[in-house]
Amino acid sequence: MPGIVGIIGRGPRGKYASDVRAMVDCMRHEPFYKFGTYINEELGIYAGWTCHPDSYADCMPAMNANKDVILLFAGEEFSGQSAGQPHKAETLLQRYESEGEGFLRGLNGWFSGLLVDRRNSMVRLFNDRYGMQRIYYHEESDAVLFGSEAKSILKVRPQLRALNPQGLGELISCNCVLEHRTLFPKIFLLPGASLWTWKESARPIKREYFNASEWENLPPLEEGEFLSRLSQTVRAIIPRYFHEKGQVGLSLTGGLDSRMIMACLNPAPGEVPCYTFGGSKDMLDITIARKISEVCGQTYSVVRIGPSFFSDFSVLAEKTIYVTDGTLDVSSTHDMYFNKLARGIAPIRVTGKFGSEVIRDHTMFNAAAVPGGLFTKDLEEQAKKAVATLDDVKKGHKLSVAVFKDFPWREYNKIMIEQSQSVFRSPYMDNDLVELMYRAPIGARSSNQPQRGIIRE
């Protein structure tokens, strides 16, 4: 999956250079990826990246005019995006130079980054406020290793290849590992909105630049004002995600979430290719999506399971497990297959993912009881413990549980597959929309309430 890797630490010259190259190599899942390394031995920086060609991050390493501020960036950023503007990560350097580290609060998207400020002998590692663009890390006495995939660390630190029983129990019961743990006991996830700073020290100063309480304490709006703002907001933000005309496809289903995207976008005829994943027969999603595409004048295709899925199953299954760091099993092999084919339609994939959770308070963030006798007693105990842990995790503001816990922990596992094949986007995680939903009138997000004023059927 496209991302960044690195080692920040002091030592003899060249100590970590071969390690960082190996870290990059193990994240090159497709031959079309762009990749490279950046090394500054004076500051103890050994870093690298992979990215999709022509993507937002395809300008690494980004540098200012004096080449004394360097940025490695993974993911995308959408604040203030409009037609005709440059859509590359290098533009973020201007914001950093004018605003300092405070520029992070204004960023809107899923991202992680490493910022090297040679003028001040300072290094900053950061991620988006949700933690949707993952950073795994491992701390040593004289260095910190980080990467967008856990395997990048395991590649150069094989002694860390041990399973965390607590994390494994959580994966079995909850379909994800909870609370920024991972499947590996000495590798952890960087929490959302993290800003780690190194300045003349091997140990980082750890801070957060945003906290969910800032949104949770916003006063609710009156129903009429809320619905008006909601309608205005979705119509304003959705075009941001279709900026690259001819390069963006819409994964269209029969659900409200993707239909609302199409209605708010109102594309010109033939502007947005639409498609639906399906089997040999047309299901309701396909029937509805095909009709919507026809009404809106867009091309439409069904990406179906074909003979190659079965003939290539073993390769696809192994890749599914490998790309997702073992957080998905062979039952998700079809996702790898579909997303590989979807890239042939458009290199950028927009979906209605997260719409039901953000706008309508639906949730699938639940735990399942584990049948007795299936695992060892110790693992059974960990799986049972995970149910109680999830109950604690889900306490608090429902929207915060969804966007700051459910999505970056549970939903991210499949996003790893999707991002490995194409640039993946969902407007429903746009900061402007999420912030507004915190101001919804009491009960407005209830799954039992009709949604009025957003889109007319």
Image (cartoon, helix red, strand yellow):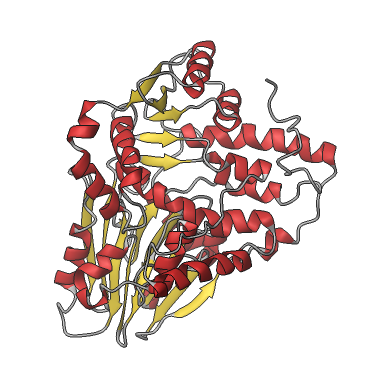
For the residue pair 190 and 305, the one nearer the viewer reads as: 305
What is the x, y in percent for residue 320? Answer: 29, 48
Quadrant of residue 42 within the rendered picture: bottom left
Above or below, comparing residue 235 to residue 413 in the picture: above
For the residue pair 234 and 388, the one nearer the viewer reads as: 388
For the residue pair 275 and 373, the one nearer the viewer reads as: 373
Residue occupying the point 17% across, 44% down: 31
Q: From the viewer's perspective, tell me whether residue 274 is left or right of residue 6.
A: right
Residue occupying the point 43% across, 60% down: 172
Q: From the viewer's perspective, tell me whether residue 265 is left or right of residue 22.
A: right
Quadrant of residue 307 within the rendered picture: top left
The answer, for residue 140, to whether it is visible in the render is yes
Quadrant of residue 199 within the rendered picture: bottom left
Pick the quarter of the image with the C terminus. Answer: top right
For the residue pair 382 and 327, the one nearer the viewer reads as: 382
Above or below, comparing residue 273 to residue 7 in the picture: above
What is the x, y in percent for residue 51? Answer: 29, 49
Say how many tags the image has. Answer: 0
Residue occupying the point 31% across, 51% down: 2
What is the x, y in percent for residue 350? Answer: 45, 35
The answer, for residue 209, to whether it is visible in the render is no
What is the x, y in percent for residue 112? Answer: 41, 59
Above or below, comparing residue 390 to residue 202 in the picture: above
